[in-house]
Amino acid sequence: MSVDLSKFQSAFFEESAEHVATMEEGLLQLEQCADDLDLLNRIFRAAHSIKGNAGMFGFAAVGEFTHKMENILDALRTGQMQADKPLIDLLLEATDGLKGLLEAAQTNADPDEDVVGPLRERLLACTESRAVGPVKGAPSPAHDASPVKREAPDEMRRIRYEIHWVPTPAVFARGIHPGQILRELRDLGELTSSADIDRLPPLERLHAEGRSLPLTCTLITEHPRREVEAVFLFVQDDSELTIEETTSSEPGTRGRGDTEIAASPPRPVATAGMGSTSDGGPKPLGEILLEEGVISPDVLRHALSQQKRLGEILVEQKAATPQQIAQALDKQRKLEQAAQPKKVETASIRVDTEKIDKLINLVGELVITQSMLSDLGARFAMDRLPVLQERISQLERNTREIQERVMAVRMLPIGTAFNRFPRLVRDLAARNSKQIQLLMSGEETELDKTVMESIGDPLTHLVRNSADHGLETPEERRAAGKPEQGTITLNAFHEGGSICIAVTDDGRGLNRDKILAKAIQQGLVNEADKLSDEQVWPLIFRPGFSTADKITDVSGRGVGMDVVKRNIEGLGGTVTITTELGKGTTFTLKLPLTLAIIEGMTVRVGPETYIVPLVSIVESIQPGPSAVKPVAGRGEIVNVRGAYCPVVRLGDVFGVQPDCTDPTRAILVILETEGERAAVMVDELLGQQQVVIKSLEKNFRKVDGMAGATILGDGTVAFILDVRGLLEVARRGEVVAA
């Protein structure tokens, strides 16, 4: 019966994206530590996983392309190539090509051969020519004074591997068939395999136990052990696996390894890579010499094949009988198996976002129900129903805990969004002939997945802008007394109930005079206007606004900064700028942690109730008679400790009759957005509470000045204010009918 793998394809593409990200991140690190074997192994494993999975799902183009990358990575691991900049550039370009192939496979489209074809040829040429020299200390095939003779495949000593493999149910659950593994082994040499019937569980326990048929394989090949282990790389964590290595002088025959008695039990496949032993002990001498490039893998294999095993020596000296050695080896195997720690199953699973969204909606309804019960309990005297109040308090605590835990399911570390920028900055530095270092901090700060997906493009544009226009060339920086290398810093941190992401550069800074001149030229401001810095900097967010002296393929057309502002504000966030000429600029994005539930202040205007997002509230006041002053044709302003704010009559904006029309007798809620403040006039503050946001636009229509609606504890509907939109409506003098 054939297995339908289509339902596993989404998991394949998700995992492949993670593996590609691992490769890209590792290659960037490789520039700083080219001899890090653990890092090389991590990159190699990621490529091997993609190749293995692609083959199982029938994506031949992906598998074939990744195999060519894998050949180069393997040569790096064994010291046959050096990880210099040209080679890393090629591998990074190949990673981009691999992304394109995966995209094409996911959308059932044809890959772009104009891009992939040349990359494929360059990878092949690099592998065949070995154009990049070996690592320092490694013998060069062409120039070594005493080269080691490489035997042709037919002349090489054949190695016999005894492989025992028991795949667990987890292997099959991921759509992997043992036949694929056996085919890969057969590609390496002569393979015979058999099933260990004696270890098969009883029929009545076969399905419940979930084990498959144990397999015993004999492989005769000239390939080194690491290539045999690589076949099992993708399944070794979910399998019982041992590989025992002996030598075989003739293909297809049993060599002396069949009669000699091993001095040690079968060596388990190493999972820590070439840089460490599987048991955490000291590295073998041969492995150290191999890492340092003193010897080649062929020399090491040949030397090891000359060694006699301890059991054979003892039998020859008649110090022990073969039976005694065999019994000792059996005991040694049992002790080793008992000492091996049991595999701890991972506690993480992949969950469909739609399922999480439904769960969050249910939690939202629970919050509403709890609010209704609280309102109901408030209608009864405490001396009559103390138990009800106690239970309601308990429900409130439980609801808050459930809500926090469910919201945490959607939270991801901001480092997920930051991971794209080391590669981006590296490419921009090379393209602009600049020296740029990227510093990142706060990567562990968590943010809602929806918000995370929406900030990628705005952050990318800000980083591009800093690299292209913010930072000077090395010559300009040297002339200004700065280090030739410029710095871009990404920093994520919590501030109140929001998350802030700061993009900072130590470059030119914004030029106030240049911005004003451009704004006057475009008719955005009048020459006579006296603008503060806080009013000048936001001008760069206007559509089409740019002070760049030249247009590049990266930026300079005035397209992008307005999109940054619009996207961030669409998430309920803000963008602020701090800058100093000649010192640098910082763009700070302030974002809500989640878009589903917010903290809000409930206010009343006449018969209507509104929710003001707490993050936008500065304070609330009741002004004195002298604090409010009329402005001819423009309403009123209020003096708040020396600063004047326009008064926005919420009742007038939404066409609601308020109880109080005198600002000096009403309550003014001071709101702030994008550095702009306003005093919103309301009749009463009802209290602070968490509210569940329900979309108006999705269910009815978009209403200017409103972000959504919620259901209060008494069952009434309250509108949630969009502070930025509210001030825009008030500025236009419009009346909004909800």
Image: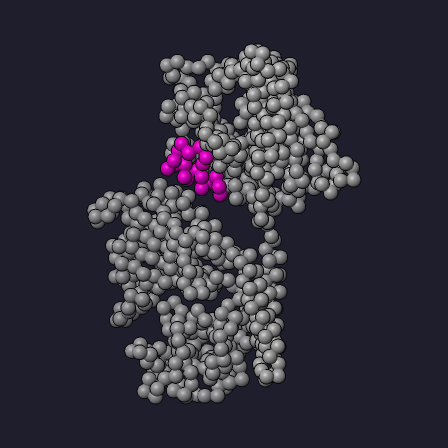
In the rendered image, the vertical position of residue 360 relative to residue 676, given as above or below: above
- Residue for point 62% across, 81% down: 385
- Residue in the foreground of this view, choosing between 631 and 205: 205
Pick whichever, 153 or 131, lies toward us.
Answer: 153
Give the quarter of the image for residue 189: top right
Assess whether residue 232 is covered by the magenta stretch. Answer: no
Query: Is 433 on the left or on the right of 190, as rendered?
Result: left
| Quadrant of the image containing the C terminus | bottom right
Image x and y of residue 232, in percent: 59, 32
Asked whether residue 26 is drawn in magenta, I would say yes
Q: Nearer the viewer, residue 357 or 673?
A: 357
Q: Main secondary structure of the magenta part?
A: helix
Report the number of numbered marks.
0
In x, y percent, where is residue 387?
62, 77
Q: Residue at x 63, y 16 (%)?
A: 322
Work out which quarter of the rendered image holds the N terminus and state it. top right
Q: Nearer the viewer, residue 115 or 658?
A: 658
Please tell me whether residue 129 is drawn above or below residue 440 in the rendered image: above
Image coordinates of residue 320 in percent, x first then y, are 59, 15
Q: Residue at coordinates 60% horizontally, 18% vertically from top-left?
A: 261
- Magenta part of the chain: 21-40
Left or right: residue 25 compared with residue 692: left
Q: Is residue 275 visible?
A: yes
Q: Is residue 354 above or below residue 301?
A: below
